Image: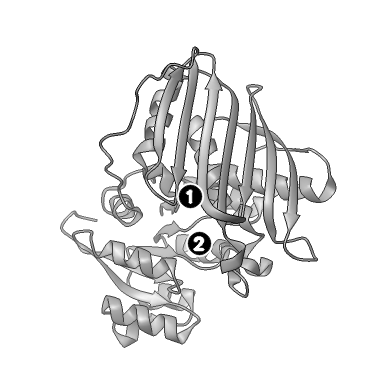
Amino acid sequence: MSDASEVRIGITGTGGLGTHLGRGFGDVDGAAVVAVADVDEDNRASAAAEFGVPEGDRYGDHEAMLDGTDLDGVVVATPHTLHYDQVVAALDQGIDTLCEKPLCTDLADAEDLVARAETGEAALMVGYQRHLDPTFRAVRDELPERVGEVDYLTAEITQDWISGQEGAWRSNPDLSGGGQLYDTGSHLLDAVLWSTGLSPVAVDAQMQFHDAAERVDVQAALTVEFANGAVASIAVSGDAARHREHVHAWGESGGLYIDRAEWGRPDLQFVDRDGDSLARHVTEYDHRSKPAAFVDVIREGADPPATARDALTVTAVTEAAYESARTGKTVEIDI
């Protein structure tokens, strides 16, 4: 499409994140939310009123919106287990798609979406926002020179997650696919995998579950082995008082520390082998939004910042972690 054309966006799932993303499109020149879909009439009406969507472009069904309104792009912000079918429906109609994380909750489905995204005409972007964060982009760009090949890595996130999810869809595994590891933990896994470029080959995990059926994890501890021999210890807690997170890594040339508290801006520091700071801090913090990046994908044919293949790796590690926690065995990964 030409740069002068209005980018017409439809949003499926307006109960929370979908509406938040819709507001972001309002800050992008030449983009507009022109249709919404949600099974909840109140959510649908509220979002439509906020974005000025006429009655004829408000739908109770995702595929009805795809069929009924001319769209350049669609945002899928529904419960996790619904993503696969809704993304397939959009890609089959040649509509560029932004799917919130996780892309899906089944490894075979993730592999199928990679194939569709890499061979079809429509683009597929996944909502892993750390790909747009200057801190993690700096790590990905500078890690080879400053750290070298990673030998050991630790990553942790703590959050008061479960208390806010009682009775919500995120604590219903039929909709969420799991628990905290498939929710905020998915961002942490993606940050580790994408920023380092490491290829996982095996996972050993232990979990504490919130439900008797052991489907909704609230605590997870993963040991991840990588193809180069590196090992990562990754901890995800959804029953902690406050939010903190870190990614620390050491390699042949030095190390890096990323630390963040209360959802603020992450701090990055590189150190040499003696532990002396190399004083690398991200000072220009131009954090692009997902809506702005998605419009570039649609309008300019730009590569998605986070791809289906990125999401496939996260799904593979996540599914292996659940299998390991339930069986007590190390699970190999072959992507």
Tag count:
2
Whether residues under marks 1 and 2 lie with C-beta atoms below 8 angstroms apart, the answer is no
Label 1 Cα neighbours within 10 Å, binned few <14 / some 14-19 / many ≥20: many
Which residue occupies 57% across, 38% down? 155
Q: Along the line of sight, which residue is nearer the eye, 85 or 150?
A: 150
Which residue occupies 35% across, 25% down? 280
Q: Secondary structure at mark 1?
A: helix
Q: Residue at label 1?
A: 117
Scheme of colours in the image: one colour
x and y, in percent, of residue 275 in the image: 48, 17
Which residue occupies 48% across, 49% down? 117
User: Which image quadrant for residue 201?
Assistant: top right
The tag earlier along the polypeptide, 1 or 2, is: 2
x and y, in percent, of residue 239 in the image: 63, 57
| In-image side of 16 versus 157 (left or right) | left
Q: Is residue 278 above or below residue 283?
A: above
Q: Is residue 140 above or below residue 265?
A: above
Give the amino acid type for the residue marked by disc 2 in the picture: Val
Quadrant position of the N terminus in the picture: bottom left
Q: CA distance from mark 1 to mark 2?
A: 10 Å
x and y, in percent, of residue 29 in the image: 18, 59
Q: Along the line of sight, which residue is nearer the eye, 37 or 67?
A: 37
Q: Residue at label 2?
A: 87
User: Which image quadrant for residue 34?
Assistant: bottom left
Whether residue 316 is visible: no
